Image (cartoon, rainbow, N blue to C red):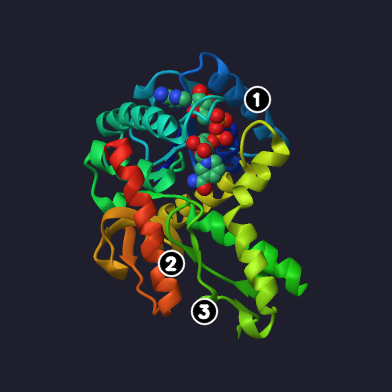
Amino acid sequence: MAKRKKIALIGAGQIGGTLALLSGLRNLGDVVLFDIVEGMPQGKALDLQHLAPVFGLDFSITGTNNIADIKGADVCIVTSGLPRKPGMSRDDLVKTNADIIRTIGAGIKEHAQGAFVIVVTNPLDVMTQLMQKVTGFPTNMVVGMAGVLDTARYQAFLAQEAKVSITSVAATVLGGHGDDMVPVRSYTTCGGVPIEQVVAKDRLDAIEKRVRGAGGEIVALLKTGSAFYSPAASAISMAECYLNDKKKILPAAVSCNGEYGVKGIYLGLPVIIGAGGVEKIVEIELNDAERAALAKSADAVRSVVAIAGA
Ligand code: TXD
């Protein structure tokens, strides 16, 4: 009989709590929810234990403040971090979250050898790079979630514009998770038809601008906190690819070793995720403008690497 999988959720905030809910609803396995705030992960876990009978779900969920409880996890999804506070610069935030990732990375290294690690904490690409460095895990086993979310935003806006089902739009967004992300128009289609034949150029320009700023648009509306439903769903879809050996092609922050002319940093590229983690980086032909945009995005990531000491 197949052993139940163990999912360690590190950080039990807005995204962490939603990850726990989705893990249960999609029957990923048993969940351990960890946070440094006393009582909070335990409270969320207890609440979710009471949801299980309502839907007839046989998953176990525990909340903890002891990182050792992630022992034997198959997948670790890391959302621990602090949001920017008034008076705090972006650089300050990078250093603070880098310290948190160093602590958590040491815990994962000690207790969850062999796990597939999905990092969600911002600044995404650099925190993922740091996680790989601290754990020393093979690069194919440490990835960052951003491209799935940025692509979903692109798809959602395009489907609304074209007035078609979301399932008719295929798109991809590459690069770092920031203002310089690269919606790849040349690989975006609606019903298999190149998107430029379906949506007018000025509308495409406006939609791509909105995709780049979508995270900020949500922050401005929420006033406190940032997007959490769709980021959680995106990370869960990546965990499912690994756990079910789906071999799906999706964009994720991965360690670049010369692909697309980028080396030595983590950056969002199309990859195949299956039981071997990141099984392959897929190289697609980009046009000159897209290649230049990707190089610019890589430069933006490099500038943060130095601040984080990754
Ligand atoms: O696409 C993407 N990758 C993202 C990333 C999309 C949206 C949000 N993104 C980032 O995810 C966001 O900028 C944050 O860095 C993370 C987590 O977002 P979330 O909305 O879940 O933040 P919360 O609610 O503040 O939760 C963070 C939790 C909180 O409960 C803290 O107590 C906890 O992290 N925390 C820690 N947990 C464990 N260990 C340590 N050291 C720690 N420090 C803080």
**x, y (%) of residue 309?**
27, 37
Residue type highlighted by circle 1: Asp
For disc 2, does the CB lie below 8 Å from ligand 1? no
Viewer can see residue 30? yes
Please name the residue shown 46% across and 40% down the image: 122
The Cα–Cα distance between marks 3 and 1, rounded to whole angstroms, is: 45 Å
Measure how far apart labels 2 and 1 are at the Cα level: 45 Å
Structural distance between the alpha carbons of marks 3 and 2: 13 Å
Tag 3 residue: 186
Q: Is mark 1 within 8 Å of ligand 1?
A: no
- Binning the other alpha carbons within 10 Å of mark 2 as few (below 14), some (14 to 19) or many (20 upward) gives some
Circle 2 sits on which residue? 293
Residue located at (32% from left, 50% from top):
302
Which one is in front in this view, the residue at disc 3 or the one at disc 2? 2
Q: Nearer the viewer, residue 245 or 255?
A: 255
User: Disc 2 vs disc 1: which is toward the camera?
Assistant: 2
Residue 101 image point, x, y percent? 36, 32
Q: Position of residue 181 (x, y in %)?
A: 48, 59
Contact between labelled residues 1 and 3, with CB atoms less than 8 Å apart: no
Q: Quadrant of the C terminus?
A: top left
Q: Amino acid at mark 3?
A: Ser
- Indicate the secondary structure of the residue bearing disc 3: helix
Number of the label disc, if any, that sits on residue 288: none
Q: Is residue 167 above or below residue 302?
A: below
